Image: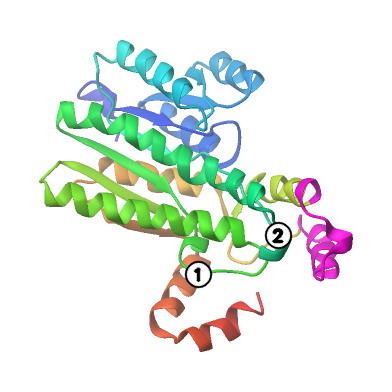
Amino acid sequence: MNPSLFCLPKSVLITGCSSGIGHATAYYLKDKGYRVFATARKEDDVKKLKNDGFEAFLLDVRDKENITDVLKNITNLTNGTLDVLFNNAGFGQPGAVEDITTDILREQFETNVFGLHEMIYQVLPIMKQQGSGKIINHSSVLGLISLRLRGAYNASKYAVEGLSDTLRLELKDTNTPINITVLNTGPIKSEFRNNAKAKTIENIDIESSRFREVYKKSLSSIKSDVPFSLQSIDVAYVVEKIIEETDVKPRYYITKATYLLGYAKRILSSTLLDKILIKI
């Protein structure tokens, strides 16, 4: 259903629209008639979005003053309102826990956790003032289970899960009509894996690592298809569903891998689950 046929289109702010899920979701929702505020971290990406008809803004979620300025510009355009925030910006830093420095771990959290939190922190007053709103936080199947050589990313997504669950309870406890939901995506065909490859090369001392051969194998096969992969547009469909649903679920699993591993997490002991995960 095209929302603009019956009322003013719902306003949706999406972070991380340069490629992948954010890019696909922005274009899909715009085509469906939503008022999409698309953001990206690089000037060239923002220029492309504007050329394609978006109300687009340069936004680095690690910069709280930048967030403040963008939200001020958006609310000036919407008479002070914002219906939906899709916290999508993020990246994956591969590496064994023993191979990542604290600075690298902190860098992972700056975008995936602290940036996400700052967006929420600044958007909540807008939504509380208007008496409604939806915040969609992009987590991962790796917010449910952990895999080897992904310690920083695993930890960041577990943090997103904890923040989202806690905020949801706090809003319900105070009868605040704002929905908090989490997307647990599995493997999605996008630039995410190629970007992760670059982060491995940039930040991991591969030759000195005990996991040297594992890294090399991973880097050489990173472009191959991953079982149960979906397209970025499949996530966009779920985002629209969340926007339109009245009874929003706390989390939405996307891809068969998420369903399978999420189920395994619930029914298996940690010892048995480890035996499965160590093979992935």
Mark 1 neighbour density, 10 Å: few (under 14) some (14–19) many (20 or more): some
> Looking at the image, is 44 positioned above or below residue 158?
above
Residue bearing the label numbered 2: 95
Q: Residue at x 76, y 46 (%)?
A: 198
- How many angstroms separate mark 2 from mark 1 (CA)? 16 Å
Which residue reaches farthest front? Answer: 102
Amino acid type, residue under disc 2 in the picture? Gly
Q: Residue 145 shows which numbered tag?
A: 1
Q: Position of residue 78 (x, y in %)?
A: 28, 15
Instruction: Answer whether residue 211 is magenta in the image.
Output: yes
Q: Mark on residue 156?
A: none
Task: From the viewer's perspective, tell me whether residue 279 is left or right of residue 170.
Answer: right
- Specify the farthest residue to the right: 207
Q: Is residue 3 magenta?
A: no
Q: Quadrant of the N terminus?
A: top left
Query: For this rendering, which residue is in front, 5 or 16?
Result: 16
The residues colored magenta run 201-223
